[in-house]
Image (tube, rainbow, N blue to C red):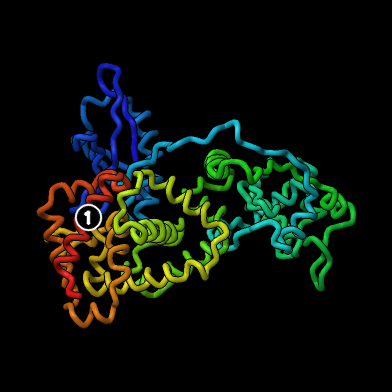
Amino acid sequence: MNIEFNIQNEETVLLNVQKKEETLNEYNLIDRDNIVWMELSLSNKSLNIISKSDLITDDNDVIESKLDSLLHEIIEVEKSGTDGFTENSDVELNPYDPDKIKVRSDKMPITLLSTMIDSSDIDMNPDFQRNLVWNNFQKSRLIESILLRIPLPMFYFAEDFEGKLSVVDGLQRISTIKEFMDNKFPLKDLQYLNESCNGRYFKDEGKKVGLDTKYSRWFNLTTISANIIDPTSPYKVKYDIFRRINTGGRPLNNQEIRNCLTGQGLRDTLKEMIGSLEFKSATDNSIKSTRMDDQEIALRFLVFYKMFESTGNIDSYNGYMDAILDEFTENNIKTTKLELYKYAKYFSNSMQNAEYLIGRRYAFRKIMLKDIQPDSYKQLINKALFVCTSVLLAKYDTERVKELNEEQSLRNHIAEKINSDVELLYYLSYGTNGKANLIYTFNALKKLFKENIKY
């Protein structure tokens, strides 16, 4: 999470957000040398400046504008329950060859959408839709635009080798059209057609009154314009287009994009993993599902556990977190839930071990000795610690662990290690997606667990 300011001598400085651990709603903006340039407090959904370096030359209006943009990101991190402040942003890795992009333009009758959805030729991903719901006003205005014969914005689809389509852009519009054709809602609060269409459904059904013939005919004659990504295009094209042109009510985060484009087997597996009582208990219900942060952290487990399973380490991690999560998602589009079953079991096993050996208040968190007091501030889930801890504890038999070890026997060892190992503390605090950060953390915990878990 970065923000750039202009400073003296016509230079700029790139600052990272650091949450003050001793307070609930205060943050520092620091540079790479950990020098504090600005102190901020979050109050009533606004960022207030506590102190600011005199070297920053941006005027107050510019600073306020930049902080407004930063505010949304901070609130999202606080809501997620995970420590996104410590993560670095990925730089584009191995960009695809633009000459290999194949996208064709097509026209599609609007009535065909419903048929294709019913036959699963268009993947509507109902799990994802739950988190992106338009209200009746938005839905009615879209249908009114169709009845007024106003062209709809371009739709984007990704086609697989079997000819099935996944929605890259236009999910809410297609969902609304499908719901209207299924008589799920009446039109309300229309701007131009209130007298003729208000309260009308798509068709007559019981007590539901459908559209007049004229409007029904206009609706049925509507065609949509679609750009369809050919399956031979590089897989990154789908993710890139989604990130660039998605026109939903808010920008989608990376996991929401993956969820739209993944296969049913992986989607169901992630859903099962984060829905388990073991996961919810071990994380103390801290990781929220609103923006699919819980699914992303479960996906990280799958990626790194499979890496660890084949080599005994995670040294092959390249340092580009979003890139490897995207690649894993793409490579497992056709993987069934049955094929991923054993990894979901390992995940459940790991959650039980983490809760028993570390404690639900402390597992996966950057705890130090001061943090293990009953009245201490509960740290956010640290994603680097989650990945390393969950992967390393996955194959320990839980019953044997409980038989041979005391409850929370690892808690103090972890706190002491983070407290005394300056390098580990740094790696868990800044740029935690980095290759060096994750590998150092993994090896430190691997050694600590080997020395302190009786097995």
Residue nearer the viewer, 5 or 314: 314
Examine the rendered structure and indicate whether residue 451 appears above or below residue 158: below
At 22% across and 57% down in the image, what residue appears? 366
- Give percent across and percent down for residue 52: 23, 33
Q: Is residue 244 left or right of residue 42?
A: right
Q: Is residue 452 left or right of residue 149?
A: left
- Give percent across and percent down for residue 445: 21, 59
- Give percent across and percent down for residue 267: 52, 62
Q: As shown in the figure, which amino acid type bears the numbered disc 1?
A: Asn
Examine the rendered structure and indicate whether residue 117 appears above or below residue 241: below
Examine the rendered structure and indicate whether residue 152 appears above or below residue 255: above
At 80% across and 72% down in the image, what residue appears? 207
**Residue 31 appears in which quarter of the rendering?**
top left
Q: Residue furthest top?
A: 9
Neighbourhood count class around disc 1 (C-alpha, 10 Å): few under 14, some 14–19, many 20 upward: some
Secondary structure type for disc 1: helix
At 89% across and 56% down in the image, what residue appears? 213
Q: Is residue 341 left or right of residue 112?
A: left
Q: Is residue 249 left or right of residue 12?
A: right
Residue nearer the viewer, 232 or 409: 232
The residue tagged 1 is 443
Q: Quadrant where the C terminus lies?
A: bottom left
Examine the rendered structure and indicate whether residue 417 appears above or below residue 276: above
Q: Residue furthest left?
A: 420
**Residue 387 appears in which quarter of the rendering?**
bottom left
Residue nearer the viewer, 6 or 328: 328
- Give percent across and percent down for residue 153: 69, 41
Say whether residue 267 is visible: yes
Q: Quadrant where the N terminus lies?
A: top left
